Amino acid sequence: MFDLFESAVGGAIEAQIAGLTGLQANTDTRLTGTTDRLTALEHRYERMQLVLVALWALLKAHTGLSDSDLKAYMRNVEAANSGAAGKPAVIKCENCHRIIRASATRCVWCGATVNAGNAFQGT
Ligand SMILES: [Zn+2]
């Protein structure tokens, strides 16, 4: 009788351990994928920053515009893209219907492409 009980409980515990082992493997895979995506995003950000610095240097060299001109334009663009009370303008993602920034090119929730007409999409 005791052996039967121990066998039944032991089997249930082994099944739980197997389930947890599978869950751990799944979590490890997801974390690795997230790390890879973060690294790719960091590289893309650094590349975009390099392009922006180069473009600004080119523009300054050929137009005579100054850093203060750029700052003034940045404030104007920010104001034009802001909602009420200086908060960023938001829209609803057409795919998942969650709230995202109007300036976003991808939904942060589901990854859907938004603002297809944005000139800076894909840079
Ligand atoms: Zn979405």
Image (cartoon, rainbow, N blue to C red):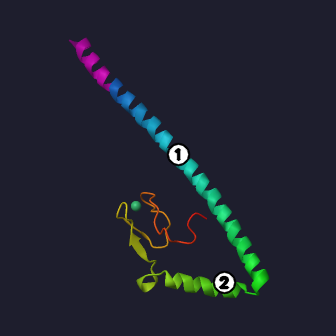
Q: Earlier in the sequence, mark 2 or mark 1?
A: 1
Residue lying at the far right in this picture: please name it: 61
Label 1 beta carbon less than 8 Å to ligand 1: no
Residue that label 2 marks: 70
**Which stretch did the figure color magenta?**
1-13
Residue 108 or residue 20, whichever sits in front: 108
Residue that label 1 marks: 33
Quarter the N terminus occupies: top left
Label 2 Cα neighbours within 10 Å, binned few <14 / some 14-19 / many ≥20: few
Q: Residue at x 46, y 77 (%)?
A: 88
110 is higher (above) or lower (below) than 27 = below
Query: Residue 8: where, in percent of width, then height?
Result: 26, 19
Quarter of the view holding residue 14? top left
Residue 31 forms part of the magenta stretch: no
Q: Secondary structure at mark 1?
A: helix
Point out which mark residue 23 bears: none
Q: Residue at x 55, y 83 (%)?
A: 77
Label 1 Cα neighbours within 10 Å, binned few <14 / some 14-19 / many ≥20: few
87 is higher (above) or lower (below) than 22 = below
Residue 62 or residue 80, whichever sits in front: 62
Query: Does residue 4 appear left or right of residue 40 in this picture?
Result: left
Residue 23 or residue 104, whichever sits in front: 104
Q: Give the spatial CA distance, label 2 vs label 1.
A: 38 Å
